Image (spheres, grey):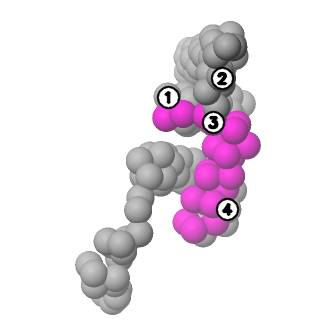
Amino acid sequence: MTETRTTQPPHEAAPAADRPVHPANILLNLIAILLAPMFLGASGGDIAFARTAAIETVNAYRTRNQADLIAVAQIIAFGLAALGSLSLSMVDDISLSMTLRLRNNANALSRSAEQNRRAIRESRSETADIPSLPSTPTAKPP
C-alpha cells in the first residue's frame, strides 16, 4: 500500500521575502530540527510537539549569542544521549562488557556536557567584566 503525502509549494514553505530573518532564528530552527528526534519518544511521536519541546528547552538556558546557542544544544544532546546510554545499560540481557561500555559512554557524554556548561559560565563572566560604554556622550566640563 502506498501513502500519499501532500506538501506545500515552495513559495508557501519558504519565509516571506519581506520578513527579515535573524541568523540566530535560523540557527535555533536548525538546532530544533536536530534535537527533535531526541524528544520524539517522549512526545508520543508528534514531531511538532518534539520541536516545540526542543526550542523551549534551549530557550530555558537564556542564551545571549550564537556560540551560547550551540553550546546549549550540545549540553542538551549530550545529556539526553547520556540518559539513553544509562537506560540501555540497565537492560538485563546484555553482556557485562556492553554494560560497562554504555556506562563509560554516559560518563564521557556527561563530562562533555559539563565542559559546555563551564564554557558558557566563563563566557558570561568574561562579558560581565567588560565595562559598558555610556549610551549618551558626556559633555566636557568648561
Residue at mark 4: 43
Residue at mark 2: 138
Which range is magenta? 47-66
Q: Are marks 4 and 1 in contact (CB under 8 Å)?
A: no
Q: In this orientation, which residue lies closer to the viewer: 125 or 6?
A: 125
Q: In this orientation, which residue lies closer to the viewer: 127 or 32?
A: 127
Query: Distance between the Cα atoms at labels 4 and 1?
Result: 28 Å
Mark 3: few/some/many CA within 10 Å (<14, 14-19, 20+)? some
Q: In this orientation, which residue lies closer to the viewer: 37 or 15?
A: 15
Position above or below: 129 against 68: above
Query: Distance between the Cα atoms at labels 1 and 2?
Result: 34 Å
Mark closest to the chain's N terminus, 2 or 4:
4
Residue at mark 3: 63
Q: Do the residues labelled 2 and 3 touch (CB within 8 Å)?
A: no
Mark closest to the chain's N terminus, 4 or 1:
4
> Within the magenta stretch, is there residue 91?
no
Mark 2: few/some/many CA within 10 Å (<14, 14-19, 20+)? few
